[in-house]
Amino acid sequence: MIIIGITGTLGAGKGTIVEKLKKSGFKHYSVRDFLVEQIRQRGLEVNRDSMRELANELREKNGADYIVECLVGRAMAHGDDCVIESIRNPKEVETLRRIRNFHLFSVDADIRKRYDRIRLRKSSTDNVDFETFVENEKKEMSSDNESGQNLSACMALADFSFNNDNGIEDLDRQVEDALKRIEKKMRPSWDEYFMDLANAASKRATCDRGRSGCVIVKDRQVLVTGYVGSPRGLAHCDDVGHLFRKMINDDGSISTHCVRTVHAEQNAICQAARRGIALDGATLYCRMTPCRTCAMLIINCGISRVVCQMKYHAGAESEEMLRQAGIQLEFFCDQVLKYDKQ
């Protein structure tokens, strides 16, 4: 899984890069779209001032990387290569750096050319005169508040920087060159390879509350796979809807879970039992921290190592159980990501 973040000045071509990446199979997640959702829910007018003010408010209240954490949670729930548009705070870059195969793109262009471009696209946030455009950019380029927008700092952290003075074809060529360089360096490790297989298995899942998959491996050989789905012969969530139960999380909070399905880890372990495959000393790959029930099965079946793509926000008890049992637990991303399902 590749995650590309995009930062850059107003009207420089971030959207053009997104369209290029979408044609290459990347799924698009936008900070701007996230903010527009929130603004409309509050019944406010969508403009650059309201977007900047809401973004700063959310970052101050929940952490400077909150918005990106939500978008990464959405992206990892799907497991596809993705592009996150409009990175505007250095803390967001810091969070994304914790994820394997993250790359930051930056794009800039002559300010007059950028202004002419935004006038042509005629969006509600771009209907301003040149002086207002320049003033808006000054507000977003730097900030003394660590929760504020700081484009210049983000652009300085970019892995690949593009200039868009010469039109779309030239920008496409620059992006294509960057993708080739990324691909050239990206022969996956064994852990990445098997996690990709777990993500592939997740595409068979039949509950949209969390399409997760699992692969169990020993001596670099796949033993069994599993994915979220109802027990044999029973109706699937995708066909008849979810079966909800309220559950108490590790921190005492209450959340709603779908209990119609068998988890991916449970299904994989059941497959091994049905086929007489011993799992002693095996490694299990899965999307998020296993739940308590899955953790107990993992312990009892002899698995010695668990590799997760990300931490589950309510998985502290399971983590402790696995560690007490002497099971090696590793994460591709060790940050507890805020899973904001969309």
Image (cartoon, rainbow, N blue to C red):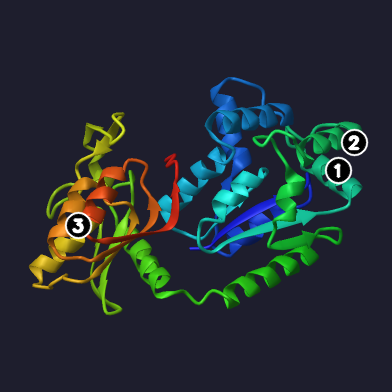
**Where is 128 relative to 289, above or below?**
above
Viewer-side residue, 79 vs 95 = 95
How far from the left and from the top, in percent, is residue 108?
80, 54
Q: To which quarter of the image does residue 178 belong? A: bottom right
Of tags 1 and 3, the one toward the viewer is 3
Q: Are marks 2 and 1 in contact (CB under 8 Å)?
A: yes
Image label count: 3
Viewer-side residue, 151 vs 341 = 151
Label 3 Cα crowd, 10 Å radius (few <14 / some 14-19 / many 20+):
some
Query: Which residue: 37% across, 66% down?
Result: 195
Amino acid identity at mark 1:
Tyr
Q: Are marks 1 and 3 in contact (CB under 8 Å)?
A: no
* Residue extending furthest toward the top: 43
The alpha-carbon separation of the residues under discs 2 and 1 comes to 7 Å
167 with respect to 92 (left or right): right
**Where is 131 relative to 224, above or below?**
above
- Dot 2: what SS? helix
Q: To which quarter of the image does residue 118 belong? A: top right
Query: Which residue: 67% across, 31% down?
Result: 51
- Dot 1: what SS? helix
Work out whether mark 1 precedes mark 3 in sequence or the reverse, and give the earlier one: 1
Task: Say which residue label 2 marks.
Answer: 130
Label 1 Cα crowd, 10 Å radius (few <14 / some 14-19 / many 20+):
many
Amino acid identity at mark 3:
Ala
Query: Which residue: 78% across, 44% down?
Result: 10
Task: Say which residue label 3 marks.
Answer: 325
56 with respect to 38 (left or right): right
How far from the left and from the top, in percent, is residue 18?
64, 55
- Dot 3: what SS? loop
Numbered mark located on residue 115 in the image: 1
